[in-house]
Image (cartoon, grey):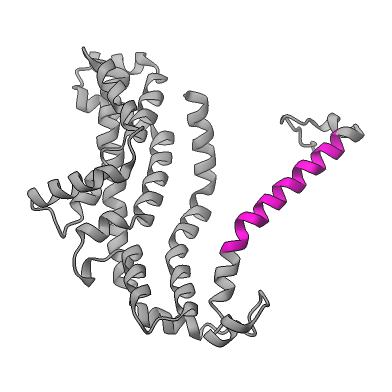
Amino acid sequence: MKKTQYTGVIREYDMHSVSVKVGYGFIIFLCILMAVIALFPLVWVILAGFKDLKEFMSSESLLPNSFDPAPFILTWEQLGIAKNYLNSLIAVVGSVICAIIFNGLLGYGLGILKPKGYGIVKKMVMLSLLLPTTISIVPLFMNIQNLNLGNSFVPLWLSYGANAMYVILFVQFFEALPHSIIEAGHIDGASQLQTFFHIVLPLSKPICSVIAIFAINATWSDFLLPYLVLRGASMQTVMVRLFVFSTEQTVNADAMMRSVVFSMIPPIILFFIFQKQLTENAVSVGIKG
C-alpha cells in the first residue's frame, strides 16, 4: 500500500528533528487548549439545562445528577418556540437570497462592468464600513414605517441585501474571474443580467457559500431589527421570543438556560453539515482574492 505523502508546512522528513517534534507538539497543545476554551461555555450551558433550579443554584459540579430530558421538554412547551423557528427560517432564507443577488449585482457592476464613476461608488461603499450599524437604526426604522413595511419580513430581507462587506467580497472575487468567459457570453448575445445569472453567479459558488453562511449567522442572531419591525407573538423570531420569555415572571434561571440551548441548536447543526464546504470555500476565496 502506497504511503501517504504530506505536503504541508511541516513535512514528513521534518519530524525526524527533535526541535520540530517539540514545536509540533506545542502547536497541537495550543490548538486543543483553544478548542476547550471555545467549547466550554457551550458544554456548560447544555449540562446546566439538565439541572432543576435547586441543583442549578446550589451544585458546584459541572455534571448534573441525572440526564433526564424532562426539563427540556417542559421548557419547550413553555416557550412554544416551534412557530418562532419557522419565522426565523423565513427571515434567514429571504436574507440569504437578497444578500447574494443584490450585493452580487452591485459587486458585478463595480468588479466587472466598471462604468464611469464606479470608483466613487466603490469608495462610498468602503466608507460605509466605518459607520456603526446602530446609527442607521432610527432612519431605517422611519423609512420602513413610511413605506408601510412594518410587521413584515421584507425589511429584514432587504437590510441584508445592502451590506457593504458582502459587496467588497463580491468585487474582489469578480475581479479575479477570467474575463474571456464573460466576453464569450457577450459574443453569444447574452445580456448583462443573463451574463450575471448564467455565467458569473455559477462560477461564484465559493464566495456565495461564504456570504450565505455569514447571512445565516447574522440573521439568526439578529435581535434589534426583528424586535422593532415584527409585531405580535405570531411574527417573533427565536431571538425575540427568548427576550420576551426572559421577561416573564415565571421564568427561572434553569429554564432560561434551556431556552438558550434551543436557540443554539440550528447554527450548530448547520456548522456540522457545512463545515467542510465553509473551510474549503474560505480558502478558495482567499486564494482568488
Q: Main secondary structure of the magenta part?
A: helix
Q: Residue at x 21, y 12 (%)?
A: 116
Q: Which region is colored magenta?
A: 20-41
Q: Residue at x 29, y 32 (%)?
A: 104
The x and y percentages for residue 208 are: 38, 37
Q: Quadrant of residue 51?
A: bottom right
Q: Is residue 3 left or right of residue 44?
A: right
* 101 drawn magenta: no
Assign the N terminus to one quadrant of the image.
top right
Q: Quadrant of residue 60?
A: bottom right
* 27 drawn magenta: yes
The x and y percentages for residue 234 are: 22, 70
Q: Is residue 236 left or right of residue 271?
A: left
Q: Residue 30: in sight, yes or no?
A: yes
Pick whichever, 82 or 249, lies toward us: 249
The x and y percentages for residue 16 are: 90, 33
Q: Residue 203: in sight, yes or no?
A: no
- Is the residue 170 above or below the residue 33 in the image? above
Q: Residue at x 35, y 35 (%)?
A: 166
Q: Residue at x 57, y 81 (%)?
A: 56
